[in-house]
Image (cartoon, rainbow, N blue to C red):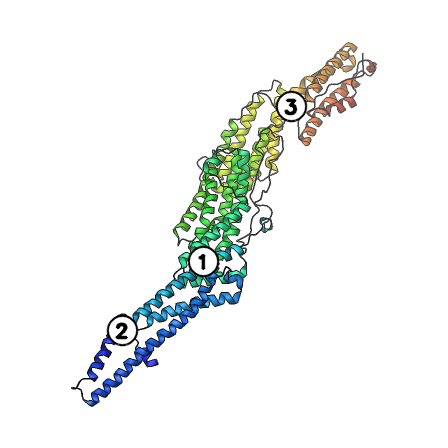
Amino acid sequence: MGDCESIIPTSEGEQHALAAFQHLVKFLRTSQNVNNELKKLLADLDSHLTSLTSYTVGKLSELETRFKSAKEKITRWESNKSMIWDSGPKEASEYMKAVDEIHKVQEGLRSLSANDSQKQNELLFQADSVVQIAMARLEQELIHILAQHKLYFEPDYVPFQSGGYDVVYNESFVSAEDSLEVETSHGESIPALYAVNLVHPHVIAHLKSIANVMFNSNYIQEFCLAFVRMRKDALNEYLFILEMEKFSIGDLLTMEWSDLNVKIKKWVWLIKIVIRVYLTSEQRLCNNIFEGIGSYSAVCFTEISATSMLRLLNFGEAIAMEPHRPEKLFHLLDMYEVLKNLLGFVDELFSEETEKGSFLKFEFHNLFKKLGVSARATFLDFGNFIACSISTNPFPGGGVHHLTRYVMNYIHTLTVFRDSLVFLLQDQATDVLSPTTELQSEVNSIPCPMAYHLQSITSHLLSNLNNKSKLYKDDALRHIFLMNNIHYIVQKVENSDLIAFLGSGWMREHIRMFQSHATIYMRATWQSVLSLLRLDGDGMKTSKAVFKEKYRAFNAAFEEIYKNQTGWNVPDPQLRDDLLIQTSNCVIQAYRILCGSRSQFNREKYIKYTTDDLSKHMLDLLQGSSRSLQSSRRR
């Protein structure tokens, strides 16, 4: 039989040729012109050809029997409402073996020659129909398995680390807080790609077997369509759990900042989880299922993730398009750094093999660049923003203005993003940097555009404060205001990373500046008072009337200063103490000399305050709470 199989004709032309040849042999055997030896050879040949035909007929009958058995195993499930894989591994295995058997029958039928090709064609047609039924059933099984065995991970259990780049702040100018509100919202850093199971692990093998059978049956497109639809639905459900909302770019551009602020923080958290956790896990699932069957994994993964990725990217596009408001800058830099950290992951997730994958990679990189451009423009506009802050009334008490607190805490918080800002500003202001100007970062000792711009911002602030100081009618209070604000600026720089950008030379200059205003304040306030306490010539020869007048004038002047300057405010305790100690030393010493120069007089009659009284009262100055002296002494 092996010899027969080796010469079985496989094409319809060969089958026709064989039938014609056998007919010719039979004709020659009956011819009278053929000798006995040739007739014997023709008889042997006829017998051999008959054996070939018999083998084909027998093989066809065998294939038909095998087909009917496999068909029965497949079609009986059409009336069964149960799902095959839910019924147990034995049932699933038998079903898949039946489908494989149908494939083998199809191959056998196509390899046969037969006198009755109609029977062969009928079996092939029936086999194709059964395969269609099986593929439809396997598609249903696929959908059922994906629906019943999908998994979600809880965001609270994602292994986040504390810290990260999420910086939120209070942008209100009316806040007197000494620091911006800095917090980590949801977006702690995920240390690396973190894959989780999106379906129960035990069904992966089932899904792979369905994929392989449908691929071998040329139904892989149907498998992919069903798989993508189900996984897209699962992703959408998960994003709903994460409260990812849908917004148009128009919605975001017109949204109130307080609402948008919250949405941006949520976006920062979402995009890290979606890319580093969910899409990483989705790609792993696709790779497992489509292993060894072409590039379908990349195609399906891209189709599953494209819509959600575009929603995230469109949100970022809208934020990058927003006007360059200072309250946006931290969020812009935050988003910029998040995308920077995700660039490599996105490049690994989306393949260049697919057009849509290439598009998503391009759009992600493009958004990263747009956020950088917007952040840089917002930062560069900050000086103009400061210049536009105009006051019509003097700041109460001469304390630290809200603008000063806002600007210094603003630029202090920017140092969190120092690496990004240095990079974004690297092509800015290089023409104004010179080796003789201290505009170098003391961290790397090279000209730094960020240092230049930070100095520019502080210059804008000082210019604005100088204009605000002109609103004070009292010259001493004007210098208290400038002293307070410049001292605050110096303290914020000295106690932060800003010192690395502004430098020690800048510090020395501004320390001298606030000390100069302190000196001018003391002169403007106390110089005339001290002149009242001086005695001309020999104090022992000064008349009682002169002493009485000096005490009266001093008391009146001191009470007026006390009434005014207890309401003035030097909020820094150390600065206030230093200022009062210097003042007290001068005033108390001069007052003590005056009091001791006429000891023969009965001073109780006209001395209203003792040196201890004065020392105590001077401690009430510059506390920001107005008082007046109510003395029990009367002349």
Q: What element carries label 2?
A: helix
Q: Name the residue under label 2.
A: 15
Cα distance between the residues tagged 3 and 2: 112 Å
Q: What element carries label 3?
A: helix
Task: Name which residue type carries label 3.
Answer: Gly
Q: Are marks 1 and 3 in contact (CB under 8 Å)?
A: no
- Mark 3 or 2: in front is 2
Along the viewing direction, whichever of 391 and 342 lies nearer the viewer:
342
- Coordinates of residue 385 in the picture (x, y in percent): 51, 29
**Disc on res. 397:** 3
For the C terminus, the quadrant is: top right
Cα distance between the residues tagged 2 and 1: 39 Å
Q: How crowded is mark 3: few (under 14 residues within 10 Å), some or many (20 or more)?
A: many
Along the viewing direction, whichever of 331 and 5 lies nearer the viewer:
5
Quadrant position of residue 588? top right
Cα distance between the residues tagged 1 and 3: 78 Å
- Coordinates of residue 236 in the picture (x, y in percent): 50, 48
Task: Name which residue type carries label 2.
Answer: Gln
Farthest bottom residue in view: 36
Q: Is residue 63 above or below residue 186?
A: below
Evaluate whether residue 509 shows in this view. Answer: no
- Coordinates of residue 468 in the picture (x, y in percent): 57, 23
**Disc on res. 139:** 1
Evaluate whether residue 39 shows in this view. Answer: yes
Farthest front residue in view: 79
